[in-house]
Image (spheres, rainbow, N blue to C red):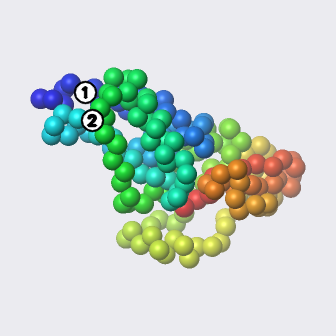
Amino acid sequence: MVAAAHDLAAVWATLEGVPDPEVPVLSVVELGIVRDVEVDADGRLTVSITPTYSGCPALQVIEHDIRDALARGGWPDARLRTVYSPVWTTDWIGADARRKLEAYGIAPPPGRAPRDSGRDDLVLLQRRVPPVACPYCGSHATTMRSVFGPTACKAVMYCDQCRQPFELFKAI
Ligand SMILES: [Zn+2]
């Protein structure tokens, strides 16, 4: 079998070493960008990725970084497949990754209500922003300074308690 020629665990390990360009404390695997790793019928490695925020300019950088890491890992002919459905959500960021974000000074995205039968459009109606805890002191006395931070994925917050500005990874 051609599949045996590829050590899929090694591929995942390589991808776990690729940081997200906008949130370098997390890998593209931890963010849930890498959806699947498989070997096609023709024996080529195919990595499926889902863009995070639609229109996020980082996608090209992410694709480049993944190709680069795979080539260095011994898979120069790996194929990248972009998967748009299901739509990426911050809910795919695991508990460990959320703790890493917090330790890095970025408030992790608030969890959302469970999705109802995949009706993504309903989520847009949720405008209510749950209280965001300051990653430095844990206070919920925080206010949003700007909806768009250094990247569109993050908002700039301010803690009224410890008077530190911090970034919030917006939930989608
Ligand atoms: Zn604080």
Nearest the camera: 53 or 97? 53
Residue at image coords 15%, 40% = 41
Classify mark 2: residues with Cα within 10 Å, few (<14), some (14-19) or many (20+).
many
| Disc 1 and disc 2 in contact, CB within 8 angstroms | yes
Is 30 left or right of 139, judged from the image as shown?
Answer: left
Considering every residue shown, the one lying at the far left of the view is: 1
Residue 116 appears in view: no
Residue type, label 1: His
Residue at image coords 50%, 59% = 54
Q: In the image, is residue 112 above or below residue 119?
A: above
Nearest the camera: 31 or 140? 31
Classify mark 1: residues with Cα within 10 Å, few (<14), some (14-19) or many (20+).
some
**Secondary structure at numbered mark 1:** loop
How far from the left and from the top, in percent, is residue 105?
A: 71, 42
Q: Earlier in the sequence, mark 1 or mark 2?
A: 1
In the rendered image, which quarter contains the N terminus?
top left
**Residue ID for mark 2:** 45
**Residue ID for mark 1:** 6
In the rendered image, which quarter contains the C terminus?
bottom right
Is 48 left or right of 98, judged from the image as shown?
Answer: left
**Secondary structure at numbered mark 2:** strand
Residue type, label 2: Leu
Q: In the image, is residue 75 above or below residue 158?
A: above
Residue at image coords 76%, 61% = 146
How far from the left and from the top, in percent, is residue 22?
A: 60, 44
How far from the left and from the top, in percent, is residue 30?
A: 49, 41
Judged by depth in the image, the label closer to the viewer, 1 or 2, is 2
How far from the left and from the top, in percent, is residue 65?
A: 48, 35
